[in-house]
Amino acid sequence: MRSYSVYFANYTIGEDAYENVSQVCSHYGKRILLIGGEKAMEAGLGILEGAIKDTELEIADKVVFGEDCTPGTIQRWAAYARECRADMIFGMGGGKALDTAKGAADQAGLPVFTFPTIAATCAATTALSVVYKEDGNFDSFYFFDKPARHCFINTRIIADAPWQYLRAGMGDTMGKFFECHFAARGDKLDHSSSLGREISNLCYGPLLEHGAQALKDCKEHKASFALQQAVLANIVSTGMVSLMVLDDYNCAIAHSVYYGLVLLPGFEEKYLHGDVVAYGVLVQLAVDHDMDRLPEAKKFLKDLGIPSTLREMEVPLDRAYLADVLKETVTGPDMEHIPYPVTEDMIYQAMEIVEGLE
């Protein structure tokens, strides 16, 4: 057999995570181009500057990434990294800022380090960027050979960020557990995918145990043990699964339901990605007739305050109104590798079941 390589995401987590930046990053040079979100840098730049003040590292420049991770922004900051003679790129912010930094670093041939300031996605630890067109619509996935060299997770910054992002991250993360196990069902997995599937258990169990407390603590700006466990699930465990399993096993019905619902006018602007994926998990469980897990998952969403019915999201359970939603759900790319065919009737019937749950 031909050899293959698997690269893991290294990370430091804690309220003082940035204190380790010099120790980790100084091996790669001195000059840093910092690419981030505006609010993210307001939250994290001062802490980062303080951490590297008496070291050989220096921030050559700091730039706001833009509004979306587009081919144009990636190329622009890659060129600027070369122009300002950067030795490395730091990405600071949420998913789009981090994806822009990763893409720019790849094109510039530089190492990249990530500094997530919210815990809504696993972008800080994955080896891909989600790229959008200039009009804001999805363009493509940009895959890399390996993830960022290191991820620095400051839990104080995340505890002070809007709690809605942590909650949405937990919704998306629980989806990773259910979708990975569902999509891989019946397959003979290689070692990497088997290991990734086992890690996906850490995308749900710790959230059941700590998620509600983590959200409460985030609302009170406490960088607690519970919050740290939720952040690890959202950023690290989910990222590790994405790195290790075949792409076929990363998503299934839950994400496809999301991509169907966002076709509704104004829907995407009102609800965060992870909150809707969590609802999609309920639909997936109903399609799969998993009546043991369904009440448990429903209770978890209710404990977090995530909408668990179409009614709560102000979407009528009407077959004609949902026609495009149902069509997109069953024909989307996330449905290409699932253990059995799923029809529009099955999705609609599952939505009826979910709507009737207490």
Image (spheres, rainbow, N blue to C red):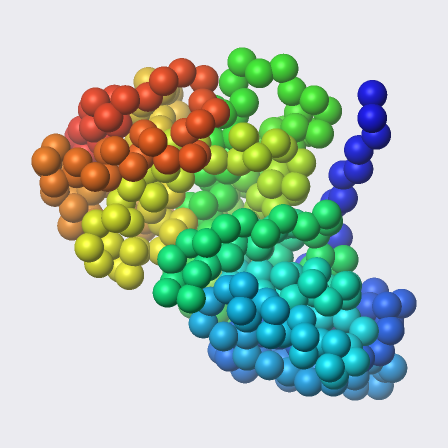
Q: Quadrant of residue 339?
A: top left
Q: Quadrant of residue 21?
A: bottom right
Question: Residue 37's x, y, as percent?
Answer: 52, 74
138 in relation to 220, above or below? above
Q: Quadrant of residue 193?
A: top right
Q: Observer-nearest residue: 317 or 356?
A: 317
Q: Quadrant of the C terminus?
A: top left
Callout count: 0
40 in relation to 322, above or below? below
Question: Residue 59's x, y, as percent?
Answer: 74, 83
Please tell me which residue is depicted at 22% across the width and 58% down the height of the picture. 266
Q: Observer-nearest residue: 335 or 240?
A: 335
Q: Quadrant of the N terminus?
A: top right
Please tell me which residue is depicted at 70% across the width and 22% down the height of the picture. 190
Q: Observer-nearest residue: 198 or 76?
A: 76
Horizontal side, residue 351 vs residue 249: left or right:
left
325 in relation to 190, above or below? below
Please tell me which residue is depicted at 73% across the width and 49% down the height of the picture. 146
Horizontal side, residue 207 vs residue 48: left or right:
left
311 in relation to 247, above or below? below
Q: Is residue 156 visible?
A: no
Question: Residue 13's x, y, as percent?
Answer: 68, 59
Q: Is residue 139 visible?
A: yes
Question: Residue 211's x, y, as percent?
Answer: 47, 47
Please tell me which residue is depicted at 80% across the width and 33% down the height of the picture. 4
Horizontal side, residue 88 vs residue 259: left or right:
right
